[in-house]
Image (cartoon, grey):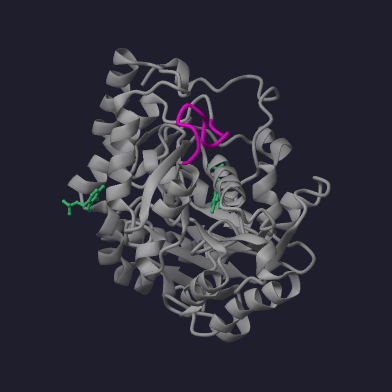
Amino acid sequence: MSTSSNVAPNDLSAFWMPFTANRQFKKAPRMFVAAKDMHYTTADGRQVLDGTAGLWCCNAGHARPRIVEAIANQAAELDYAPAFQMGHPKAFELANRLVDLTPDGLDHVLFTNSGSESVETALKVALAYHKVKGEGSRTRLIGRERGYHGVNFGGISVGGIVTNRKMFGTLLTGVDHMPHTHNLAKNAFSRGLPPHGADLADELERIVTLHDASTIAAVIVEPVAGSTGVLIPPAGYLQRLREITKKHGILLIFDEVITGYGRLGTPFGADYFGVVPDIMVTAKGLTNGVIPMGAVMVSADIHDTFMQGPEHLIEFFHGYTYSGNPVASAAGLATLETYKEEGLLTRGADLAPKWEEALHSLKGLPHVIDVRNIGLVGAIELQPIDGQPTKRAFSAFLKAFEQGLLIRTTGDIIALSPPLIISESQIDEIVTKLAGILKTLD
Ligand code: PXG
Ligand code: PLP
């Protein structure tokens, strides 16, 4: 570790930090300077157990040798190749590997640099697909309350988080939202899929009746909503959405930025639920979070619909300077190799029973109004302090950090999503620490 990386910057003001309480942070900064496997190292030399895989992205843990080496070698061999009208082998290789890994029927891949860009790409593919097919009246996009689809304009338009939307004007027009499925009164302390609420998918029928199917391009949902506090779909809900979208010729987009790459104990959420969407949005775990990259998988029908007209013409006017960037592609290939060698894309399924037992042992502790789990994801919902929403969970976050544990909070919900390499004793460590913290919260 170099000495310079351990020196705290003496001026923190220039970097306007993302989704952060900047003034609070800069008064008492929390800095990581190194990471290895399941742990971060803080600037003052403490080890912190990673309960969140970074931000849901370091599924194989940190500083994995194969990935580190692949990035270094690729940067030395071919650092960058133009993304438009030129190619390099690793982007094609990675696309082939992804097509092998995704459910049958998702046969083509567009590369991006983040989840947010993957969402924009998917929405644009959906709109253009209908246009190319001669159904140009299908322009509406349907999202869901409490959905998170990144921070770009398309994503916040279909997203359903009030704070992420209300400052930014009128957003995309022609967007509608289904209700979210979170229902504490009926489903609190469910293990795995909550039993009540599959009928909420029928709200899509109501929206179709209102607008007519001929005006609707696509429906986008997260199989499990992560950012808004781990909202697990009621049993049968996603299957029902698939039936309704298919019946009306509406594309179904799964935003698998969090659920992709092993998080639920299957390669993708689509595998977990046995529901194949028309478009799958991914990022994060694709490169283990090390190099920014996203991938959007689309059906053969969608791809082939674009492949017409004179061959010298560009078929889809969209792409990024860094789409399929060589270093990112190398990181992606090395990540998939690591997942495969260590069986990580299914390890969550082996650990899920232990994870479920451990988390549900927190039921009955002060302020805990729900515990929920699926794969290697968990949430503990706390009763907010009267008149001070988010404060109770945020103080749990600060206490956990002091005690050497990294958790995420959103509202008054603690979200957990450790790297898929976690050991059983580290699961116990997370839950023991949390239990101690819950007992001391105001
Ligand atoms: N879709 C989904 C479902 C996501 O979870 C994005 C899109 C956007 O990805 P990018 O790479 O543009 O951030 C996300 C990202 C949290 C948290 O703690 C979640 C995300 C990002 C940062 C923090 O819940 N999800
Ligand atoms: N690719 C990755 C990254 C995997 O993790 C797996 C299985 O876990 C596979 C592909 C499928 O590999 P195999 O054909 O050896 O079962």
Q: Is residue 208 left or right of residue 78?
A: right
Q: Compared with residue 420, is residue 63 higher up or lower down, i.e. above or below?
A: above
Residue 215 at x, y percent in the picture: 69, 62
Which residue is the extreme one toward the top?
76
Q: In which quarter of the image is residue 105?
A: bottom left
Q: Is residue 72 left or right of residue 209?
A: left
Is 369 covered by the magenta stretch?
Answer: no
Residue 325 at x, y percent in the picture: 42, 26
Residue 101 at x, y percent in the picture: 29, 51
Q: Quadrant of residue 316?
A: top right
What range of the chain is rendered magenta?
A: 308-319
Q: In this view, does 280 lie to the left or right of 152?
A: left
Q: Quadrant of residue 388?
A: bottom right
Residue at the (45%, 77%) spot, across then down? 193
Which residue is the extreme one toward the front?
310
Point out the image quarter for the C terminus.
bottom right
In front of the other: 46 or 38:
38
Point out the image quarter for the N terminus.
top left
